[in-house]
Amino acid sequence: MRDRLIAVAVMLAGSVLAPACANAPRAYRAHAADPELLHQAVHQLTEVMVYDIFSPPQASRAYAYTSVAAYEALRPDYPEYRTLAGQLNGLTPVPAPAADSEYYLPLASVHAFMTVGRALTFSRARMDSARTAMEDGMRRLGIPARVFRRSIAYGDRVAQHILAWAAQDHYLQTRGYPKYSVTAEPGRWIPTPPAYMDAIEPHWGELRPFVMDSGSQIRPSPPHAFVMTRGSPYYRELVEVYEVGKHPSEEQRAIASFWDCNPYVMHVQGHAMFATKKVTPGGHWMGIVPIAARKANADIMRSAAVYARTAIGLADAFISVWDEKYRSNMIRPETVINKYLDEHWQPLLQTPPFPEYTSGHSVISTAASVVLTDEFGPDFAFSDSAEVEYGLPVRSFPSFQAAAAEAAISRMYGGIHYRQAIEEGAREGRRVGELIVQRVHTRAATQTAVRLLTQ
Amino acid sequence: MFFDYDRDGDLDLFLIRNSPRPVSSFGLRNTRNVRDPLGGARLYRNDGGHFVDVSEQAGIFGSEIGFGLGVVVSDVNRDGWPDIYVSNDFFEHDYLYLNNRDGTFTEAVERAMPSVSYFSMGLDIADVNNDGWPDVYTTDMLPEDEYRLKTMSSFEGWDVYQAKLREGYHHQLMRNMLQLNDGNGTFSDVGQMAGVARTDWSWSALIADLDLDGYKDIYVTNGLAKDVTSQDYVAFLANRETMIQAASGKRVDFLRLINAMSSTPLPNYAFRNHGDSTFSNESAAWGLNTPSFSNGAAYGDLDGDGALDLVVNNVNQEAFAYRNNARTLLKNHYLQVRLDGEGGGGNRFALGAKVTLWSGGQQFFQEAEPTRGFQSSVDYVLTFGVGRRDTLDSVTVEWPDGRVSLLEHVATNQRLTVRQALGASLRQPSGHPPSRGPQRLPLFTDVTDKVGLPYVHRENAFVDFDRERLIPKLLSTEGPFIAVADVNGDGLDDMFLGGAKGQPGALLMQQADGRFVRSNPGLFEQDAGSEDLGAVFFDADGDGHPDLYVVSGGSEFSDLAPALQDRLYLNDGRGHFRKATGSLPTEYISGSRVAAADYDGDGDIDLFVGGRVVPWHYGRDPRSMLLQNDGHGHFTDVTERLAPELARVGMVTDAVWQDVDGDGRLDLVVVGEWMPITVFRNVGGGKFVRLNTPGLEQSDGWWNRIVAGDFTGHGRVDFIVGNLGLNTRLRATATEPVTMYVKDFARNGFDVQIVSCYNHGTSYPIVMRDDLIKAIPSLKVRYLNYKDYARQTVTDIFSPAELAGAVLKQAHTFATALARNNGDGTFTLVPLPLEAQLAPVYGILAQDFDGDGKTDLLLAGSFDGVKPEIGRMSASYGLLLRGDGTGRFAPVRAAESGFFVPGQARDIQAIRTRQGELIVVTRNNDRPLVFRSTRSRTLARR
């Protein structure tokens, strides 16, 4: 039903646009709706962030600003799509293209995405060569040089606007804030094997969210008290992690490694070490977007909208969960199990370097699934091949919700989270996702249609 | 390794093993006491040719956390029984097994050595400073080369370091250590001062007199065929295929990974001993610097010319056999000693025998223990270099069974065979090496337990590095200090000892029976929230009774924290104190010390209060205060008006009032961190101007303490000034200073401190790449790879525009020194002996302790609050320096003086009691130590 409403909206919008297009019929415009370049750009950003070793929260921030830039630079071609200015905290109206000039906005959009992405990542040469390759591809479509230059310039303007907005989100200040203090308090998080890395991003919850009023707007209930007596809720959940970790089934093992999404796993052999890198949890969901978009035959504008809303959901979910992580500072199961139950026990997955509660993957996956369900419907089956190139298999899911639920429980199978962090995390993620769905609207026409329908 | 640990005449076996478990599978939990069938070391007792595993009953650890790589036997405490040192790789600390003489051993490394090599590889034990005590040299992996340091090394973070400490892994630091044997059960690592700490990935260490000059040199082999710790490799070079293998749970092909690594052969090191515990690498001059991957090494006189030749094993390369040309090139003489044991029980090479050569009071000492270095055994014949000596006064051999052979008037340049069966007397050796002078009673006796001060300093848990990640040291562990006065007029000294944040200071009143009891506890409890630093008793309100001023300091506060307000406590003359209100200006300065004097001659006592640090902004100069007394105990801050140059003079740690220029007016001498010794001349009218003092222009150091006195006998005031010391990675000279730039480089409102020091002529930042990009994320673009950062200097990292406006701090000298007043307005900075440079000096007490009429010095200090990059500075246990009255000081080691101060000493003061004088030494986070001085004569109280 919803799909049909959208189709109607697009048709309506298309008819409004028709006269403008008719003035300048150009062959290259035949490709204007093709979303593949945008998918490529997102994929390129993921690749670079994997190489640059982005932590999961940092990656979510980059996805959000790049996706909003791409969306805003493309949107003027699609009047039925609403600007996010005014909908996202601190985002002022984005510069509009000149009314009397011709642009090729898919180019502006990809250029804005890559420009913002370049500024927020570190392997600049890689980003540059990828962007140049993509733009050369577009140039070969026959875009007139003047239009090409003008579109690039517009993409730049949008990118600068987005970067100026990003610069106000408190990220830079949080680089100077105090490090997490390790103390001897029982039940408080301490660094974990094998690398004993410092806790990452203790102040991520203080970043300006995109939609939430603050990192603490959506607060899960507090975790179980750290009580090491048999039968306490904490102890029961600890033993559950321990037991599952001792004898995981093949399926549990497969689920845990499929959703590992650890950007930096350290392998140690004597003095020798090497790290393997994978996409972050947010990156995994940004990899599900093109799978769904392709299956739904979404054009570039719709794809850009889905990327933007999903990325915003992921970013706010990370801010929310990180806020809680450094409120409760919960100790990881590995630490407690090694100390009290079994010195030799190792989790299936490497414990990531930050406090346990709530489970980041549970929160962000659920938030993303709520947004994607809103976009594509509740029974949207898909085959998740997001990490095939990192050696992981394909898993099929009947819905986004099912995928998110599996991602959440995978953290207990992996031995890095207690059940409560997963269940409360999923609840937290649902609330974040619902907030995004309610508050971030990309299609004016859709809303109108919905209103018409309900009257 | 074979040795006769039970002295029954036959050789027993000690076997070290590497752990059967991969190091990556261990957490931090300490399982040292859990025996593992395949782990740890084994001691096999030789029972008539049959070897019995007696490890457990002998107290030898047998856990799987021991990654043993080296073992050497030596009688380190010279009690006649062989002890064992095992060097352990990875997280387990090394083991020093002291022989209990009953078939068992006591592992004592934590007690004996304040820190040990972290990734200990090979080792050797021999007497490097010719004092008759065996010293221990362990090898590790720290590169000397800056590029290798920045690309191959990573240091443990503070949290992990502390966690390992809590788990019982002791202080382990990644560098070679030269542990000088103090002769009283403790060792002092002087590796950094000696210049032998950094030899890259090292294996063997051999201590032998290669140039025959009488001082044993150190030969180190190094190199690993693959750069397995390359940080770029770790983070960036694992390829997609490897990642896929790892992700899909398939076994990773480590051989392929290893083949992809770079390979860097390294020249071995040959450290020439200069005879004063300093060394220089002569591997190039001696022809020993062929790049290689060398591990095992052994020495022996292969060609019979009297000099030690070397045989070295190499990986992927032919072995080296080096002929030593010392005999032809240097004309030094030698003596070789071949021991012919009685061999009844099988020890016919007399393993465990000790040979001492004497010549004019100089001794040359070796032990017959051929297993040395790394997986190697050396010549059984002992080769001694003796310089140009033609004859020796005597040669003594202490045989393993305790008997002694003595040969007198022995010609050098010969190989001597000493037969145990012939002429070995039954005389038992003294057990300890004969000292150079006549034995005296110690000057100091530790009476800490007897006096039983009711006070223990408890440092609060605070980690400055959590707030300011790149600062070089903690500023929150600087106390406690002592103030001394007779506060109740009973003729007995009382004292105030400061408390850390959260702990009240303690006023201890001396009782007639010599005990000390706490007084006014409730009063000080109210101010427990402050971190007490300097304190002084002085008459603030002119009633003739000593009042108490306490400086509040520490870095664990924010600006405007009320706990930073200093306090004045007024004395009613009977030792009852109340807090003065409204007497002091309101201030939020994190201060250090206070110095009291009537500098303006108006009959009341005024104060100088030093500012130590601006919390959150290490490197920016805090406010210091000149406080003028109105005669009734009300103090006004007159700094801006009368001494504007004092207001932000630096990061002050101490100050003294002295008439430096001899004009009859008290001048002020101020010292601090990153500060020169600074003199402010009292120009009258209460005003001060900075005095130009030639000789002190480049005296910027990390000074902690200044004490005035006439140390040179010229009748003028000189100063003894405590500094960081020379036994640290931080090295500063007039031409190669340590520098620090401070600025909000990330433009996020937070100061970042970039400390640099020189390495082979270029000044490089100490900060490693990961920590730098955490503080300044934008730099990750330029330093994505470690190699991109490896050779960067401050001016490479930052543009002139970025450096503009940055605070620049420098240090040109770290030596604890005598500032000699030349009487013409100039000073000469004379470093105290090397023994005084082993650690930072915090406490200084200048008095005549030995009763010869000349002023002596007690020094104490050490400092744990530095990250592993710099490393705990704890090689000193306090030191007595005997003054000769002309400015020269002779060190007296703790074993002889009785002044033995382990831990982080902060202050030393003398207390008068009915039974004579007590010396009180405060220590951070510990109880004070109390010594009774046996011959002390109080000259002057500061």
Image (cartoon, helix red, strand yellow):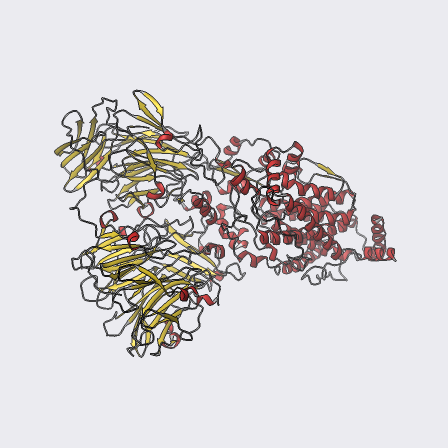
Find residue B332 and report its image quarter: top left
Find residue B125 and report its image quarter: top left
Residue B769 x/y as whole percent: 49, 49
Q: Quadrant of the C terminus of chain B?
A: bottom left
Residue situated in front as seen by the camera: B444 or B329: B444
In the image, is B345 to the left or to the right of B261? left
Q: Residue furthest top?
A: B49
In the image, is B328 to the left or to the right of B480? left
Q: Residue furthest left?
A: B409
Q: Residue at left 44%, top 28%?
A: B38
Residue A33 x/y as whole percent: 77, 49
Whether residue B240 appears in this view of the structure is no
Q: Residue at left 44%, top 64%?
A: B614
Find residue B709 and report its image quarter: bottom left
In the image, is B47 to the left or to the right of A63? left
Residue B427 x/y as whole percent: 15, 32
Residue situated in front as seen by the camera: B383 or B6: B6
Residue B291 x/y as whole percent: 38, 36
- Name above or below for residue B104 compared with residue A421: above
Q: How many marks?
A: 0
In the image, is B61 to the left or to the right of B488? right
Q: Residue furthest front?
A: B513
- Name above or below for residue A96 compared with residue A402: below
Q: Quadrant of the N terminus of chain B?
A: top left
Residue situated in front as seen by the camera: A321 or B513: B513
Whether residue B243 appears in this view of the structure is yes
